[in-house]
Amino acid sequence: MPKPRLSDTSFAVLGLLDLFEPATPYQLKQFAQVSIFHFWSIPHTQLYTECARLAEAGLLDERREQGGRRRRVYRLSAAGRKALRQWRADPETDLYELRDPGLLKLFCGADPASLAKAQLARHERRLHAYEELLAQSDLSEGVRLSLESGIGHQREYVRFWTGLRKPPGRSRSAG
């Protein structure tokens, strides 16, 4: 069997299963919504197709429920654990792709002050949510460090959008 091409999404699925196995794709979606979806988006349908693809490639073990909805339940296989371990050990990554609709609107000519008001409120809510999550005592080091990074990003967004709320006559570059 040829070695499957593994994407960042593949590794997101492997990593989620490493933390929350055994799981159905629906359960993975629920886990992702309170964890990696804060910094890594995956279309929900892709979780289902990626699980099936990884199982076909031998990286996940699949068990089908015998009754009821006959859901597919996945676990990491030995090959999946090895692939995840190798990926974790490789320090090389691409820079992240920023897809911020607020910045896109700003670039395309939206009024900075009115846009800033809405964006500031959203980023303050997300900052608060991240700070609450970080206050939990049972976090793994990876989760804690990811939250700290997210908090830093949100603080910068709060600083940036707060500056855009100032009247045009005042300096926006101070910070």
Image: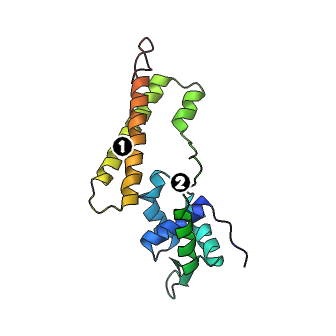
Q: Amino acid at mark 2?
A: Ser
Residue at 39%, 58% (x, y): give it. Answer: 143
> Where in the figure is residue 110, as x and y percent of width and height?
54, 26
Per the rendering, the mark at residue 127 is 1
The quadrant the N terminus occupies is bottom right
How many neighbours does mark 2 have within 10 angstroms: few (below 14), some (14-19), or many (20 or more)? few
Q: Which residue is mark 2?
A: 41
Q: In the rendering, at what x and y percent does residue 134 appear?
A: 31, 53
Secondary structure of residue under mark 1: helix
Residue at 47% in and 29% down: 115
Task: Please state which of residues 138 and 129 is positioned toward the viewer in this rendering.
Answer: 138
Does residue 12 appear anywhere in the picture? no
Quadrant hosting residue 107: top right
The residue lying at 26 percent from left, 60 percent from top is 137
**Nearer to the camera, 161 or 137:** 137
Up the image or down, 172 lies above or below 56; here it is above
Mark 1 is on which residue type? Leu
Q: Which mark is residue 73?
A: none
Q: x, y percentage for residue 8? A: 59, 59
Which mark is first along the chain, 1 or 2?
2
Residue 117 image point, x, y percent: 41, 29
Q: Looking at the rendering, which quadrant does residue 60 occupy?
A: bottom right
